[in-house]
Amino acid sequence: MSNELDGKRIAILAADGVEQVELVQPRDAVAAAGAQVTLVSPSAGKIQAMNSDIHPADSFAVGAVTADVSAEDFDGLILPGGTVNPDKLRMDENAVRLVRDMAAAGKPIGAICHGPWTLIDAGVAQGRTLTSYPSLRTDLRNAGATVVDEEVVTDNGLVTSRNPGDLDAFCAKIIEEFAEGVHEVPA
């Protein structure tokens, strides 16, 4: 256990359909590094995680709802994937606002697999170098991002990875970026 993230407040923004491993492994990694982690979702109660998008997995208690939080409440943000999860987040104006405000404040954000979909609606993808699950890459390009096929990509505090196979590299990089703190906001 390290203490790189002692005192840091990290939000995981997720909804029903989140890919379980992409929620659990980053959550456990940042918690082990000392962060206080809150699961934020559009609705109170629990969210249903999935394995490989189609197999129900565990459910997770929501710690806060998007309507009740702001970027000021957190030092960093994690956007796990699963195809249904980010599609639901994109439809929640408060979730989109949280992502946009975190980016505008220069706070680090980690998005994996289908998680970058929410970055598009928040207006965060334009002008950034990102990676994602292959099926999102055209969407990212159309949103003005430069897309690369790499295990983990960092662009001024914005960390992206392609899939669950990249989780070790993704977790290490988000811990590093969260420990660094606020980044210069891109013009």
Image (cartoon, rainbow, N blue to C red):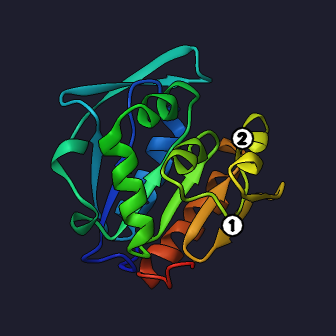
The residue at which mark 1 appears reads as 127
Task: Establish if 47 lies above or below 125.
Answer: above
Task: Establish if 32 lies above or below 134.
Answer: below
Q: Quadrant of residue 117?
A: top right
Q: Which of 32 and 16 is in front in this view?
A: 16
The secondary element bearing badge 2 is classed as helix
Q: Quadrant of the C terminus?
A: bottom right
Q: Nearer the viewer, residue 29 or 45?
A: 45
Image coordinates of residue 140 in percent, x first then y, are 71, 48
Q: Can residue 28 be seen in this view?
A: no
Residue type (three-letter) at the residue carrying disc 1: Gly
Q: In which quarter of the image is the N terminus?
A: bottom left
The residue at which mark 2 appears reads as 139
How many marks do you count on the picture?
2
Q: Which is nearer the N-term, disc 2 or disc 1?
A: 1
The secondary element bearing badge 1 is classed as loop
Left or right, 178 with reference to 97: right
